[in-house]
Amino acid sequence: MAEGMTWSVTDGDKLTQAEVYGEVLSQLGDRYPDIVALTADLATSTKIGRFGRKYPDRFINVGIAENTMFGLAAGLAQAGLRPVVSTFAVFTALRSAEQVRTDICYQNLNVKIIATHAGISFGQAGSTHHCTEDLAVLRSFPNMTVIAPADGMETGNAVAASMEWPGPVYIRIGRGFEPPVNRTQDYGYTIGKAITMKEGKDITLIACGVGVHHALRAAEVLEKQGLSARVINMHTIKPIDREAIIQAVKDTRRIITIEDHNIMGGLGSAVAEVIVESGKACGFRKLGIPDCFSIVGYPEDLYHHYKFDADGIVETVSEIMRMEIEEDEDWEDEV
Amino acid sequence: MPLTQEEIKELTRKAWDIRKAIVDITYTCGGSHIGGSLSETDVLVALYYKYLNIDPARPDWEDRDRFILSKGHGGIGWAAVLGDKGYFDKALLKNFNKTGSPFGMHLDSLKVKGCDASTGSLGHGLAIATGLAMGARLRKKDYRTYCMMGDGELCEGTVWEAAILASHHKLDNLTAFVDRNGLMIDGMTEVITTLEPLPDKFKAFGWEILVVDGHDFAAIGGAIEKAWAIKGRPTVIICNTVKGRCVDLMENQAQWHYGGLNSDLRDQALACIDTHYKGILG
Ligand SMILES: Cc1ncc(C[n+]2csc(CCOP(=O)(O)OP(=O)(O)O)c2C)c(N)n1
């Protein structure tokens, strides 16, 4: 384990996001004896069961009862424990939205939530299981921190960092087959601080979750076409890294956001708010699920179908590059 | 009227076909909730081939009986039945789970004929069924509403909220089934969160309780007919079942809640099913 690191996973770049977090959480168990892990009959599917095997006395499987689970987490937090709760994103953000908001966020309780199978990563399961609203919903809850890690390593980092971050934290990950973008854990992850994965001057791709992988792939293709694309991993949707966004507006004047989420209310909206408030002109497009109930299918096919894989991004880039964008002389006051 | 021996044989033959279809679709689609699909099969077969007043040629017929599969992950078993009944071309089931297919793991009421509610998020079905039953009464319709729940699903509070409501409104046109296979995903219901004494719980909520062997057509049929005769309260038929029924390697195995089959496993599963039914039917 490197100096100062709280976890270490061998071959973490080959494990799914959930496998890494299950392992990391069980490593954090010693350092944080107040962690109690909760799930609602999804110990196996979410991988929080790993913690349960190591610390059976600090693990509660509530049965298939999500609303009660989030209420229980609030009570445990008030009693001085550090609940870490894991179920699918759809049951967290939608079914139990009120428990998360009123019982947990209102009192700013120390509850960490790891929601799996988010977006369309559980594509074959259909609309009842897709969750393309969670970033929008949870971003609107005061006190809530919202994180969408890019891969397994980052999930490990986010889970570890959340332990030292005050208040409720929502970490949303996919089903687990998302390709890794980080080879090691040691790249300076900080909640709220965007990561520039690749420098570029013509356009900026701001992505979260599996979108980061697609953006990097698109950037490679664009490079061959003579376009230099900056790729920003905006893993924290709230609080969002305003400086990174404004800098991108200034440097590239064109931004595309990429997320496995409805294009309404999630990363794209959060980035748009910052751009508009800056008063600066910027070509802008949001890629994700275009405000519809997503169809059934394999996630990779669906990313392509909804045009936020590398092909779709490249297509949108060529569209936005044709836009005329007014020059603005007066940048220095903003950045 | 109790089922005749001939009817029971007929239903048994259907269940044989449906269980084999479940295995086949699981093989082609890459993975399914096979355990719970095999446990619910006999109740679905009894309903669809004997008791439901339906017309597959008119899936939107106003007066049809309603069936809600609240344990929506059993969709593959339900789809096998609906396809066989002729709600759609069975051949389409080859596309189960495939990109752009109307059939995902949980059936979609907008895409699959014969499916009246997009379930899959557990704990929704009984409330919807209660609404359908109440709607029949308000619109002076004679149709009955049936709802099938998993036993693990009973952990959801909404089940009990609907149970209170249905008994308060004396919805005797509503029959619920519990597929009591004793397992949820992470293990046994009684180890994770105790459900027993389950009949007493429903009883305390004002329901009529019938407990049957959920793989015995005579018992299932008898209970359904008994429920028709009960006035002034809804009935729940607790069906004792075996998760993974008829496939030895899956029976009572929590890890077969969801799984995929390679061709060896598929052949093994089909052989098990054949042996089981040849034993019964000769
Ligand atoms: C609200 C909700 N929470 C969790 C799940 C994930 N899930 C799917 S099936 C299942 C277990 C269901 O157990 P049970 O109701 O007993 O069904 P069966 O054993 O008959 O398959 C769970 C937890 C879900 N689909 N919906």
Image (cartoon, rainbow, N blue to C red):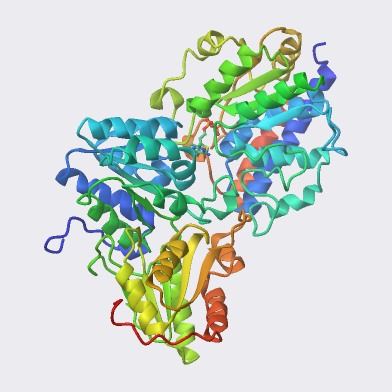
Residue B247 appears in the rendering:
no
Residue A327 appears in the rendering:
yes
Q: Tell me what residue is drawn at x 32 percent, y 72 percent.
A: A244
Note whether B33 is above or below A301 in the view shown: above
Q: Nearer the viewer, residue A194 or B97?
A: A194
Q: Tell me what residue is drawn at x 60 percent, y 49 percent.
A: A126
Relative horizontal placement of residue A134, taking residue A191 as reference (left or right): right
Q: Nearer the viewer, residue B18 or A59?
A: A59
Relative horizontal placement of residue A310, taking residue B97 as reference (left or right): left
Position in image of residue B119 (x %, y %)? 62, 38
In the rendered view of the protein, which quadrant contains the C terminus of chain B? top right
Relative horizontal placement of residue B147, taking residue B124 as reference (left or right): right
Position in image of residue B82 (x %, y %)? 76, 39
In the rendered view of the protein, which quadrant contains the N terminus of chain B? top right
From this viewpoint, which residue is outermost toward the right? B57
Q: Nearer the viewer, residue A314 or A8?
A: A314
Displayed quadrant of residue A333: bottom left
Q: Tell me what residue is drawn at x 16 percent, y 44 percent.
A: A30
Position in image of residue A85 (x %, y %)? 34, 41
